[in-house]
Structure formats: structure tokens, C-alpha cells
Image (spheres, rainbow, N blue to C red):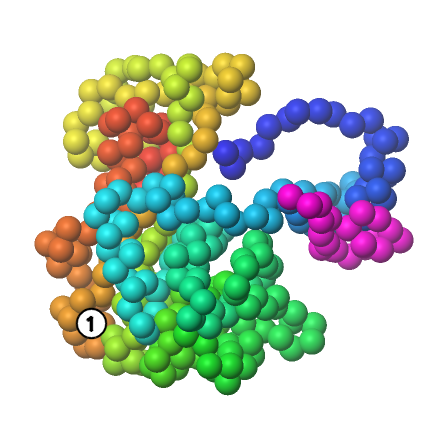
């Protein structure tokens, strides 16, 4: 659920042998101990991404287990409510334009993109992706892995894609000005572009792209849907405990807007490994970019909170607060999201 748990302690004498074994399995240099290394161990049903980092006291290893079968990723299981799912699906029905998902690393953006590609992947469509790394293989989709060492970046891959007559382009991430401008160019020339970006909210994506050098009138013509996504930890139903909400319980700066009297707090039991949490839940803030919002982008009038509220856009903070009142998540998790 995104937290660290101590499960087992290794003897110091065991560690070098384990490090070497992992390096061998992931085709890394066992003699290299001064530089970071990244590799992969492949199995029939899943992959293990390996990251090795030299530290003061030895090499630190992180293993990330990823299923290589995307068949179980489904848009209906992502946690969108009915209205958000409708707005999202309307956005991806459009033949061209840009759909962007924002959020920090590990917030589930890539999973949402893969679920989207599964819907769009039809025989009549030429779908191409450029990713770093490719997390799942999708049948019928042309997937390209970024390789900066040979000059294959997001921007250079996108430039090549435009000569491949694609219908749909998925960019793993918009990292720089060149990629942002190329994505807009692709959308203007009749392609549907899906990508991710690092911003704090769905509307912040607009100012971020303008800061990257995208002309507001071009952005207004191409951006059709902006999404912000977060994951919040779910309280363990077996041990969560209802408690009165006292003023002293509130973190500094937290506003109890709904005047909650009670909330649930994490306790810990054998079912949740004594963490108090079990599983995570995705939150989505989805903004369909209509004529009104396009005009605001074009004129660089970016204060639109009132308009978004009138259009029924629910902020991430509002949804997190609802989960707190329903006993799904904790006060700490809600405050963490509100303070971003």
C-alpha cells in the first residue's frame, strides 16, 4: 500500500551473495559497485524491475514486481464514479486532441493509460506508444522503449511516429518543452494523444504546459480532457476504530469544512500486517475542456475555480474528504492530499 514494512533481517554475511545473484539474474555487471544499475528479471507471468544504488554502507536494491499481462486492467475497476467515467470515455472518443493525466510518481497514471489503450485498441486503428519503461505488453499495439543512450527520447520517438500514420499516440510522460510542443503538433494534425505530466491538479496542467512554451491558442485548440489522479490508503475493515474528532486531532491548517464529529483511525491487526491499512483507492479529478474553458486558456485567464464548480467538477480534496466521512480512509491521508 505504498508504505515500508520490515519483514525479515538478513545477516551481513548473506547480503553480498544475494546481491550478486540478483545481478546475474538481471544481466547486470557483478563487478560494478560504484555506479547505479537498472535491470529486469523476466518470468512467464510477471517481470521484476531491478534498481541497484551504491550507498555509504553498500548497495541498496529495490525490486518492483509487475505483472506482464494487462488483460486484468479494466477501466470499470479503476474507481471512477459514473459521472467521471462518462466524462473520461467521452474524452477518448474524440478522433484527435490531447488527454493528459497528472499526478506524482506511483499514483496509478500508467495503469489508467493502459486501461484506456485496451478500449481504444481496435484492428482498424494504428496505435503506437513510447514508454520508459514498457510496463505491460499489449497485443496489437506498437510499443517503443525509450533509450536515451542512443538518442531515442520521447520527443525523437514522437517525431518518428508522425511518419508512421498513427491514429492514437501514447507518450509515457511529457517531461520537457520539446515533447510538449510535439504532442500539440501531433494533436493538431489529427491524432489522439494520451500522456502524463507532473502537476498538483487537473487545471494546473494548463499553466504547466504554457510554462513549457506551448502557445495558449494552440493548447486551447488541442487539450480535450485533463485528469488528476491520486491513490489514498484504505483503512483495514477488520481493525479500524471509530473515534470522536477533537480539535486537537486536526493537523495544523486542516479545515473541518463538513464539521465531522467522528472519524475512523488505523489500529493494526494480523490481516493488515499491523499497519492499519489494506489496499488503496484511486481518486480522479476530471475536467472536460469545453468551449468556455478553451476561451479561458486562449486568453490566459487561469483562475477558473468558480466555473469548474458550476460545471460540477469535483476536486481531489473534496473526494478525499468524502472518503474520510465514509470511514474509507484516515485523517492523515486526507491531510496529506490536502497539503499538496
**How far across and down, in percent of the image, does residue 280 sit?**
43, 35
Residue that appears at 19% across and 77% down: 299
- The picture places residue 340, in percent across and down from the top left corner, at 36, 47
Q: Is residue 130 above or below residue 245?
A: below
Q: Position of residue 337 (x, y in %)?
A: 35, 41
Q: Is residue 127 left or right of residue 44?
A: left
When the figure is inspected, residue 296 is found, relative to residue 90, above or below; the finding is below
Classify mark 1: helix, strand or loop. Answer: helix
Residue 318's spot in the image, x, y percent?
Answer: 23, 41
Question: What range is drawn magenta here?
Answer: 24-45
Indicate left or right for 41 with 95 as reference.
Answer: right
Label 1 belongs to which residue? 294
Position of residue 161 relative to residue 43, above or below, is below
Is residue 190 visible from the viewing direction of this image?
A: yes
State the image quarter where residue 200 is shown: bottom left
Q: Is residue 330 left or right of residue 271?
A: left
Q: Is residue 30 magenta?
A: yes
Amino acid at each position: 500500500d505504498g508504505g515500508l514494512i520490515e519483514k525479515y533481517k538478513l545477516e551481513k554475511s548473506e547480503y553480498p551473495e544475494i546481491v550478486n545473484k540478483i545481478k546475474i539474474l538481471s544481466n547486470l555487471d557483478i563487478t560494478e559497485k560504484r555506479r547505479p544499475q537498472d535491470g529486469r528479471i523476466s518470468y512467464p507471468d510477471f517481470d521484476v524491475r531491478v534498481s541497484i544504488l551504491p550507498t555509504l554502507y553498500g548497495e541498496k536494491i529495490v525490486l518492483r514486481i509487475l505483472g506482464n499481462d494487462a488483460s486484468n486492467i479494466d477501466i470499470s475497476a479503476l474507481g471512477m464514479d459514473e459521472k467521471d467515467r462518462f466524462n473520461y470515455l467521452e474524452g477518448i472518443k474524440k478522433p484527435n486532441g490531447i488527454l493528459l493525466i497528472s499526478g506524482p510518481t506511483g499514483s496509478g497514471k500508467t495503469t489508467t493509460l493502459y486501461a484506456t489503450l485496451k478500449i481504444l485498441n481496435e484492428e482498424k486503428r494504428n496505435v503506437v506508444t513510447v514508454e520508459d519503461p514498457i510496463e505491460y505488453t499489449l497485443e496489437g499495439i506498437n510499443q517503443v522503449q525509450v533509450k536515451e543512450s542512443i538518442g531515442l527520447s520521447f520527443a525523437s520517438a514522437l517525431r518518428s511516429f508522425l511518419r508512421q500514420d498513427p491514429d492514437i499516440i501514447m507518450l509515457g510522460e511529457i517531461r520537457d518543452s520539446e515533447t510538449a510542443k510535439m504532442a500539440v503538433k501531433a494533436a493538431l494534425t489529427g491524432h489522439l494523444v494520451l500522456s502524463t505530466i507532473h502537476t498538483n491538479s487537473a487545471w494546473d496542467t494548463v499553466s504547466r504546459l504554457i510554462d513549457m512554451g506551448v502557445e495558449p491558442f494552440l493548447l486551447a485548440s488541442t487539450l480535450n480532457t485533463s485528469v488528476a489522479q491520486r491513490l489514498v490508503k484504505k483503512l483495514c475493515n477488520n481493525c479500524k476504530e471509530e473515534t470522536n474528532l477533537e480539535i486537537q486531532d486536526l493537523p495544523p491548517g486542516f479545515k473541518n469544512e463538513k464539521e465531522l464529529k467522528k472519524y475512523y483511525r488505523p489500529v493494526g491487526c494480523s490481516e493488515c500486517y499491523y499497519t492499519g491499512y489494506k489496499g488503496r483507492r484511486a481518486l480522479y479529478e476530471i475536467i472536460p475542456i469545453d468551449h468556455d474553458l478553451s476561451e479561458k486558456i486562449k486568453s490566459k485567464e487561469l483562475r477558473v475555480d468558480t466555473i469548474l464548480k458550476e460545471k460540477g467538477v469535483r476536486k481531489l480534496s473534496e473526494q478525499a474528504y468524502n472518503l474520510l466521512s465514509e470511514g474509507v480512509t484516515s485523517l492523515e491521508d486526507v491531510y496529506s492530499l490536502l497539503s499538496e
